[in-house]
Each structure stands twice: as C-alpha cells, then as structure tokens.
Image: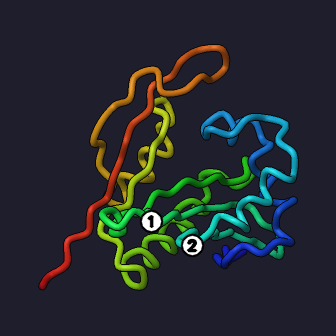
C-alpha cells in the first residue's frame, strides 16, 4: 500500500485531529489531549509560508507535517517543522515520506537553507529519523515541556543545506 503525500485540505481536519488525539502522538508533541476540532481549523488560516502536508494510505489520512517558513525578513531562509503519524503506522516509513516531501519543497522550491525542529530527548525513534535526513543536534533544552507529570528535556535540531554558487 503506497503512501501518497499531498497538501492537506479542510476535509482532512477530523482525520488530523484523530492522529493527534492518540496518546503516543500528543505525548511527543506540544499538543494537549482532548483538543476541539476548532483548534485544528487554525491549520487552514496559518497564513503565508505555512505548508500543511498529509500522508494518505488507501484514502485515509495517517500522518501530518507542518512546514512553517519564518516570516521575519532576516530569517526567511529558515523553516520550522513538526509532524505526527498515526500509531498504527509508526515505524513504517510514513514519517520518512512526509519528511522527504517537505525537505524537497524546502530545498528545491522554497529556497530554504535551514530547517529546524524541536524533539523530546526521550523520543529516540524521531531523533533517529531526523538524523537519517541530515539533522544535527544543536542544543539540549532543559525542562522544555511538561509531560506525564514531569518536566522533560528537548533537543533543538537543524539541517543546513549548502548550495554550490
């Protein structure tokens, strides 16, 4: 079953919400459990420079990635990303497909030099994925977020593309 990557549509809101309602997904993002659909509708009014991709298998949305190009004039060469994959499809290449598509856009269409993200330091699978795509740890952020009743650290990772002149 091939994974199709496409831009998200408003009809995908319920499916995207369902992904982030799963415990392993919201635990590894800054999302809270039990979010209303209206919070996810913001994805469609995020403004200029926001690219909202979804992964689809057999007509079902199983993953989402947001790529936000910085709008500050001095940081327009930078984009931030975050993503979530449905629990039933984690470890099956969905995150890789989403990341590959987003980085292709960043490198070949958006003229992005630096892509950055934040990931909990305990999320070994995500860190390994990002490292496979050339991301490097730049800093560890102490007590970055509150998760399951404890403060947890996060890593700031970035991938910098150098182009021949």
35 shown above or below 79: above
Query: How is the structure coloured here?
Result: rainbow
Among the 4 quarters of the image, the one containing residue 139: top left
Which one is nearer the viewer's eye here, 11 or 24? Answer: 11
Q: Residue furthest top?
A: 149
Label 1: which secondary element:
loop
Which one is nearer the viewer's eye here, 98 or 88? Answer: 98
Q: Residues within 10 Å of mark 1 (few under 14, many from 20)?
A: some
Is the Cβ of the residue at disc 1 closer than 8 Å to that at disc 2?
A: yes
- Report, in whole angstroms, how far the alpha carbon at label 1 lies from the one at label 2: 8 Å
Among the 4 quarters of the image, the one containing residue 153: top left
The residue labelled by disc 2 is 48
Q: Residue at x 68, y 69 (%)?
A: 55
Report the side of 78 relative to 27 (left or right): left
| Residue 71: mark | 1
Expressed as whole percent of the image width and height from the top left, the position of residue 16 reads 78, 58
40 shown above or below 61: above
Expressed as whole percent of the image width and height from the top left, the position of residue 76 reads 36, 68
């Amino acid at each position: 079953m091939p994974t199709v990557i496409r831009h998200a549509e408003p009809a995908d809101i319920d499916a995207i919400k369902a992904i982030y309602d799963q415990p392993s997904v919201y635990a590894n993002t800054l999302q809270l459990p039990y979010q209303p659909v209206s919070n996810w509708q913001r994805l469609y009014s995020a403004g200029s420079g926001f690219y909202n991709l979804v992964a689809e298998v057999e007509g079902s949305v199983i993953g989402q990635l947001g790529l936000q190009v910085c709008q500050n004039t001095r940081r327009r060469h930078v984009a931030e990303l975050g993503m979530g994959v449905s629990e039933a499809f984690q470890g099956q290449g969905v995150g890789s497909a989403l990341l590959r598509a987003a980085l292709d856009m960043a490198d070949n269409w958006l003229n992005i030099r630096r892509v950055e993200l934040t990931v909990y330091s305990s999320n070994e699978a995500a860190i390994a994925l990002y490292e496979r795509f050339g991301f490097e740890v730049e800093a560890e952020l102490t007590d970055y977020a509150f998760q399951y009743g404890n403060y947890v650290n996060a890593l700031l990772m970035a991938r910098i593309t150098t182009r021949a002149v």
